[in-house]
Image (tube, rainbow, N blue to C red):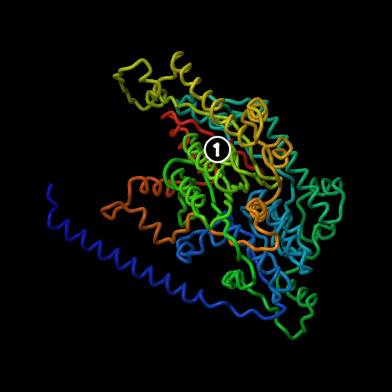
Amino acid sequence: MAMSRARKIVLIILGVLLALILVAVLGIALLFAAFRSNAPTIHDNSVLALSVSGPLPDYVPEDPLRKFFGGPEQSLTNLLLQFKKAKVDKRITAILLDVDGSGAGWAKSEEIRDAIADFRSSGKPVYAYMEYGMNKEYYIASACDKIYVAPPGELFINGLAADVMFFRGSLDKLGVYPDIYQIGKYKSAGDMFTQKSMTEAHKQYVNELLDDLFNRYVEATAKARGKSPADMKALIDNAPYSAKAAKEAGLIDGVSYRDEVHKEIKKRLGYKDTEELRLVRASDYRQVDAQSLGLNKGERIAVIFATGDIGSGKSENSPSGDQSIGSDTLSKAVRDAANDKTIKAIVIRVDSPGGSGLASDIIWHAVDEARQKKPVVISMSDVAASGGYYISASATKIVAEPSSITGSIGVVAGKPVVKGLYDWLGITNEYVMRGKNAGMFRETEKFSDDERAKFEAWIKQTYYEDFVPKVAKGRNKSNEYIDSVGQGRVWTGAQGKSNGLIDEYGGLDRAIEIAKDLARIPADKGVQRVIFPYPQTFLQEFLNSKDDEGGETSETQQLRQQRAVLASLPEDARRAFRYALLLDKMKSGDAMLLMPFELRVK
């Protein structure tokens, strides 16, 4: 059908408007870049002001437009870099760390503590300031020389609680039956749909995992504050504390407003009473080039970030902070790094609870091929479990923090049977089929005995012939041993190291040091970190989401619509909606290598 003249005019006008908007946005970006290109003036005896707050993803490209459109302002990688720069920068004599509402998980919190300890090894102090503190905030702050809390503030170090959510009751009310099969005694990802409470196996590993995290939390904070673990446990049992009570208990060093903390730091750094504290803002200090301080120079090591759920196609890295791992994007990045002769080693930073089994296997294959060409080191972030462990298994070395969540070697698959819901809504449907098992994934019928037998055989093949052997090969273990520590069991990094699932403790910096050693780069030589794939700007991602006619692709529209719905819901409702989408994905037979990531430890 020919396009009407009026429609052509409208489209031309819209195209012109869009072009003008893009030109304006590009102009703003260039203006920002011009301002950013000038390195700030930093005086001697300055104090760097850093903040630990918000979601703190592993990596976010430095792009002013992302922040303008509501994206996260800081990443863990960027925060840790500021510590490294300040350590060797003679103009910086201390750090003031504002710890406020950290969204980092336990492994990232450990990595921040490691960075604080490394900075303090230079003889420079770190002061922590909180207006209030929860468990993780206090855990991070306890690594500092001094902790200050505002007078009206409180310390909620009440201990750790694991939150597990189940949807079976809601599905029953909706008339939806979860016809799900999962392999592994502890593979409880499907339990969120099939159970109303934890099974005994589920309770066992959650309790053991929580014990491990809690004991490490107690030991670390007790050591930092010069107390015994027994005394620290008693203090935790008596929490929360007002700022005054926390000081009396020896949990903090001072009850002060921010300006009073500034005066205290001035006194310790030898300032005159009439001098202002020379504070350097993090946003300014980020403009100091690491190479100007002798950092990030030398042989090239590729760093690839794998963050979010694993699926087929392209990765997502939206301006709002949503991230996912696409098998096409990640496997290409691994292959490109492996084929680049200037790259001496590859480090893959994994922060993922898993996802599609098919997509995980495609990424595993790319990592396995790359390993034949050069060292590949995995750096586990907060979570690298199930599919996240699958894509890690063939690496040369695996590095994790003791509090990283890993393992969950198991498979879950199935389909939602919605006949009850359709009956309630008055919907009827009929199937006309050819082939004995053509109706296997009918959404109104449970698996027949024959269909279930076929389905379970396929899932067992995924676990016993793909997942287990590939992990066994990568870890140089027998299939029987990997099956014994698999079974869907979730481990901490400390437990994973004891059973051979990881090689060494540490964060991204340690993983890069190991990669450097494996690549036989001399210890006295530096390395340059090169991000693969090269991060796209907001404008590039926006333009890449368009189809050939300038409109959004149907996939992009769907993702945008889902994000809009999710953003408008309360946190627990967002989780429920996310799992509903997961259940919907399984109805087409996609096996899920997924940990029970509804588990939240606070």
The residue shown at (79%, 47%) is: 218
Name the one closer to the observer, 508 or 43.
508
Q: Residue furthest top?
A: 449
Q: Residue furthest bottom?
A: 274
Answer above or below: position of 331 versus 166.
below
The residue shown at (38%, 72%) is: 27
Q: Give the residue pinned by disc 1.
A: 387
Answer above or below: position of 11 versus 258.
above
The residue shown at (59%, 56%) is: 56
Query: Quadrant of the rendered structure where residue 126 is?
Result: bottom right
Name the one closer to the observer, 559 or 576.
559
Name the kind of residue labelled 1 in the image: Gly
Q: Position of residue 391 (x, y in %)?
A: 55, 40
Query: Quadrant of the rendered structure where residue 372 is?
Result: top right
Answer above or below: position of 183 versus 382.
above
Indicate left or right for 226 with 414 as reference.
right
Give the number of marks. Answer: 1
Q: Position of residue 597 (x, y in %)?
A: 58, 39
Say few, some or many: other residues with alpha carbon within 10 Å of mark 1 (under 14 / 14 to 19 / 20 or more): many
Q: Position of residue 1 (x, y in %)?
A: 13, 46
Indicate left or right for 600 with 68 as reference.
right
Indicate left or right for 527 with 150 as reference.
left
Q: Position of residue 64 (x, y in %)?
A: 48, 66
Answer above or below: position of 557 versus 285.
above
Q: Look at the numbered disc 1 and give the secondary structure of its residue.
A: helix
The residue shown at (31%, 23%) is: 429
Name the one closer to the observer, 51 or 311.
311
